[in-house]
Amino acid sequence: MDFERDVIERSKEVPVVVDFWAEWCGPCRQLSPALEAAEAKREGEVVLAKVDTDANQALAARYGIQGIPAVKAFRDGEIVDEFVGAVPPAQVEAFFDGLAPSRADELLAAGDELSLREAHELEPRRADIAVALAQARLARGAEAEALEAVEGFPDDFGAAGIAARVRLAEAGVAPDAWAALDAGDRTAALDALLDALTAPDSAAPTDNGAASDGSEGDAGASLDPATRRDLIRRAVIGILAGLDPADSTARDYRRRLSAAL
């Protein structure tokens, strides 16, 4: 077995459970049928790999194997769960259950609004599902419904960003940003939001619904300068939350946001 290929790289596509064992180990032979049955039951959603510690002593040392059987689950190249010893079959099943995609995960991967709504009903406390559902609703212009999806997740950056977007859009702030975001142009959206953040407060809508530069605002949703700035900040952070933290674009916009604040 090629560990890098069959475990590390493979785990980036599907969870891999590694059984560190040895031929002379009685508990290993006792555990093996339960592991194999659990893998077969999940029909490819979780795969099993076996490492003979006698034949792979360096690999066993690399992962700190001190007693066997030692079972480690890998996802995205990293260990995400593990146990040691010949545990009962029910515990093995629970271990595999924690790795296999749930029905909600499958619906989230489908990505359409109907699937996302069902996923949200199944796991209403998952912020990632709520954010995806809100984004699908925004795509069809249903801002109030999008806000409803995320309002229970104030501590999630993506959810807070969508809630801020809805309030800013209602107040007529940075419409170019939302048009760019809906078109998939995050860079243009971030530029427009940072421009709005650094614009003089006098450009914001006044209490009578008109901006001081003569443009029309939303009379029912005017924002005081401090609230406006905070909502723009949240909207920017929400967009950045959807980017890879290591991405140079994300780092650049974080620096620009800090400077603007």
Image (cartoon, helix red, strand yellow):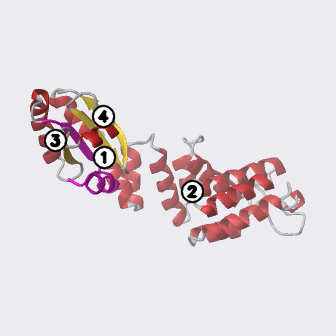
**Of the image marks 4 and 3, the number of the one nearer the N terminus:** 3
Residue 47 can be seen, yes or no: yes
Q: Is residue 252 above or below residue 45?
A: below
- Depth check: give the residue in front, 32 or 88: 32
Amino acid type at mark 1: Ser
Residues under numbered marks 4 and 2 in contact, where contact means CB atoms less than 8 Å apart: no
Numbered disc in front, either 2 or 1: 2
Q: Under tag 3, what secondary structure?
A: helix
Q: CA distance from mark 2 to mark 1?
A: 28 Å
Give the labeled residue for mark 3.
38
SS type, badge 2: loop
Q: Residues within 10 Å of mark 2 (few under 14, many from 20)?
A: few
10 Å crowding of disc 4: few (<14), some (14-19), many (20+): some
Q: Earlier in the sequence, mark 3 or mark 1?
A: 3
**Position of 201 relative to 99 (above/below):** below
Viewer-proximal residue among 102 and 18: 18
Q: Which mark is residue 102?
A: 1
Look at label 2 and name its amino acid. Answer: Ala
Query: Where is mark 2, residue-wise?
Result: 246
Pointer 3 and pointer 1: residues touching (CB < 8 Å)? no
Task: Give the residue number, with chain letter if any, for mark 4.
Answer: 82
| Residue type marked 3 | Ala
Q: Is residue 134 magenta?
A: no
Q: Amino acid at mark 4?
A: Glu
CA–CA distance in space, label 4 to label 1: 19 Å
Image quadrant assignment for residue 33: top left
- Between disc 4 and disc 1, whose residue precedes? 4
Query: Magenta span covers which residues?
Result: 1-22
Residue at image position (35%, 50%) is 105
> Is residue 115 at least partly visible in the picture?
no
Residue 193 spot, x, y in % from top left: 72, 62
